[in-house]
Image (cartoon, rainbow, N blue to C red):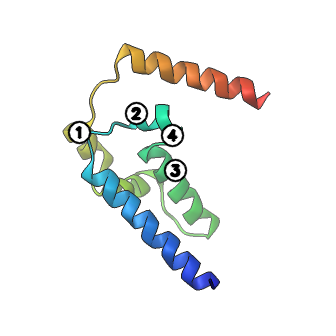
Amino acid sequence: MDERTRIELEAAVFRRLLQHLREHPEVQNIDLMLLADFCRNCLAKWYSAAAQERGLELDYPAAQEIIYGMPYAEWKAKYQTEATPEQLAAYEERQRRKQGADH
């Protein structure tokens, strides 16, 4: 497979991932973090960083709007629920384990 085709396929897969996440707003970011160690906000940070690495101005809120398909504040008001104490505890434990693995 040539480089151009690979990049086009990766871009298509990324667009499909975003579509899937937009179609499933019931999947909360905390759930994604607990299961996969990334969430929509991580994607927005990576998107913004990739743009900046290429000399493009794309701040985090603009990247969030690309990822969420709407301004983050709007998505949050429509779809985000409060994390449960159990989810927060599991997230904190995951972060502790990650920090321990980094040392």
Q: Position of residue 28 (x, y in %)?
A: 34, 36
Q: Is residue 89 left or right of residue 1?
A: left
N-term mark: 3 or 1: 3
User: For mark 3, does the 10 Å Cα neighbourhood hold few (<14), some (14 to 19), or many (20 or more) residues?
Assistant: some
- Give residue 31's mark: 2
Outermost residue to the front? 1
Look at 48% across and 56% down and name the residue there: 59
N-term mark: 4 or 2: 2
Q: CA distance from mark 2 to mark 1?
A: 13 Å
Tag 2: amino acid: Asp
Q: Disc 2 vs disc 3: which is toward the camera?
A: 2
| CB-based contact (under 8 Å), mark 3 and mark 1 | no
Q: CA distance from mark 4 to mark 3?
A: 16 Å
Q: CA distance from mark 3 to mark 1?
A: 20 Å
Tag 1: amino acid: Tyr
- 83 lies above or below 9: above
Pointer 3: what residue? 45
Q: Position of residue 86 (x, y in %)?
A: 40, 15
Pointer 4: what residue? 36
Q: Position of residue 99 (x, y in %)?
A: 69, 26
